[in-house]
Image (cartoon, rainbow, N blue to C red):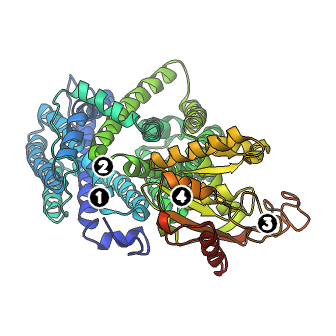
Amino acid sequence: MSTNPHAHPNQFALLGQRRFAPFFWVQFLGAGNDNLFKFAFTVMVTYQLQVSWLPPESAGLVIGAVFILPFLLFSATSGQLADKYEKALLIRFVKSLEIAIMALAAWGFVARNVPALLLCVALMGLHSTLFGPVKFAYLPQHLSERELTGGNGMVEMGTFVAILLGNVAGGLLIALPETGARDTAWACLALAVLGRVLAQAVPLSPATDPGLKINWNPFSETWRNLKLARENIVVFRSLLGISWMWFFGAVFLSQFPAFARNVLHGNEQVASLLLVVFSVGIGIGALLCEVLGRRHVEIGLVPLGAIGMSVFAVDLYFASRALPPASGLTLAAFVAQPAHWRVMADLALLSMFAGIYSVPMYALIQMRSQPTHRARIIAANNILNALFMIVSSIGVGALLGAGFSIPQVFLVVGLLNAVVAFYIFMLVPEYLLRFVAFIATRCIYRFKVRGDEHIPGEGAAVLVCNHVSFVDAVLLMAASPRPIRFIMDSRIFRIPVLGWLFRLAKAIPIAPQKDDPAAYEAAFAAARQVLADGDLLCIFPEGAITRDGQLAEFKGGIMKILQTHPVPVVPLALQNLWGSYFSRVEQGTAMVRPFRRGRFSRVGLAAGPALPAQAVSPQGLRERVAGLLAQPVI
């Protein structure tokens, strides 16, 4: 694990570090080789060979199914192996296996032996099945929380670029007259050997559960992995969310050739252009996650991604209906028509938002899963992904069989995405809450955070903060990579919208002891349970929102909590928020005149070093918060 989260300026700098660069290029070459081999084989069977039992119109479907089958059969086993054994050792074994598979494939290409090449497709599916859990379990062992989103973004971008380059190279090589099969064979073998050489430089990653006993039954182990994932409901629902993204993407990828031919009236080059646009969009979206998340795992990006996926999938339907009549368009003729640019823009944007949607989910799963069975949970995700893609193929086939056009299929999937996303966000409100915090800190305020490294990434702690506005909790949510439970004045829960939002966040209502003794004691009982569960608790020791912008005296409730749960206490200070729309002003009224301080009002949060419980006193905490308030806003 990196000890300095500020060690590099952005995600691209990771490519200069040994803990990431060899691993990145190994997975890049593996994904590229997978697709070079599969696409070259598909083109060979479709255009160059006459195989009675594998007709051209079903070749792509059969090859895809053979490749996915090992994910269903062996993912559970591969997850156990990745948790039990050192990961660099597994990576080297998988890359050695790839050389053997590609040697057989090279003979199959030269001999034009279709059964041997189909066997290699299955074996490459096994190769990818073994590598998948290792790939995603490797990153959290070598990247800090601040680097995890950027690292996943780089891997996601690299994977889709490798898929694109592999498909293009495979199609070009196999089409070479006379030497195509031989050149393809050499290319596959060379990429496998280069990947194995680079694997030697991948740093060691200790086993997370070396005492694990392997269960070789894939069905019972798959069920056990899903039960492990369900222990953390946020992780499990995130697995479903990622699998839905693969469902969504598979619909578009599977229909590109027919969409290009029957709807856009273009040739095979137009179909390739759609794949290029889609892949580039995914890559850009994946890379944007680190910038948009300010180098944190920002799951507030997931609803943003889901919204964009639906909006541009629906607009793709309308753009496809507005096309001028044409036939047999070449790439140049297709690009020359302005109406086609809207289609390409929709495709690029929906894929970009799919990248924004998926990367934070992967990072969240890696961060929230127990390290001892992280790889097994990733393996369960691979199984779910495969199942969702199979259901996607069946569903698209059923819609097309029922008379739906391809643009209508895109419309249905876009609308269905909105329904599924809303359902997931209601089941896991943390996504929606972080989205609200994301919007507030990017579109309402210019929000800067100093000292966020003091907010603990794991373990129980109490955060104490001054209380300036009705959205203090929202801003604090945006600053923390982990969920926070807030103790809040019960009167806030009566405010429309904000009350619903705080109930969704499972904030703990508290009332003055003299007014409601039962609610007062219930709040402290709930607070102690939060700390007992190892989570973050935030309190506003002033007891109410300031009416004059000044820091009031801190009450002693925190001492009552620390008596039974002596955890670290982190002082926080919200700066320059007084006088904004959601705070009171001198007249005592909040939420009047929305732009009374202009748009993008600059506010800040300063966090100080944690104090041990035995060093805490209300007056001492107040002095710490006052000191943070006195610092200039960034």
Question: In percent of the image, x 11 and y 35: which residue is there?
Answer: 116
What's the residue at 30%, 49% (across, down)? 371
Q: Cβ–Cβ below 8 Å for labels 4 and 2? A: no
| Nearer to the camera, 602 or 95 | 602
Mark 1 crowd level (few <14, some 14–19, many ≥20, 10 Å Cα): some
Q: Marks 1 and 2: which is nearer the front? A: 2
> In the picture shown, does residue 491 fall above or below 420?
below
Q: Say which residue label 2 marks.
A: 371
Residue 352 appears in the picture as rendered: no
**Hey, what amino acid is under mark 4?**
Val
Q: Are marks 3 and 2 in contact (CB under 8 Å)?
A: no
Closer to the eye: label 1 or 4: 4
Amino acid type of the residue that numbered disc 1 sits on in the rendered structure = Gln
Q: Residue at x 49, y 59 (%)?
A: 289
Label 4 packing within 10 angstroms: few (<14), some (14-19), many (20+):
many
Q: CA distance from mark 1 to mark 3?
A: 42 Å
First in sequence: mark 1 or mark 4? 1
Structural crowding at the residue carrying mark 2, measured as other residues with C-alpha within 10 Å and reported as few (<14), some (14–19) or many (≥20): some
Distance from Cα at disc 3 to Cα at disc 4: 27 Å
Q: Are marks 1 and 2 in contact (CB under 8 Å)?
A: yes
What element does badge 4 sit on? strand
Measure the C-alpha gap from mark 4 to mark 2: 25 Å
Q: Which residue is mark 1?
A: 141
Q: Quadrant of the N terminus?
A: bottom left
Give the labeled residue for mark 4: 462
Give the answer, above or below, for where 276 lies relative to 496: below
Task: Give me the disc on residue 42.
Answer: none
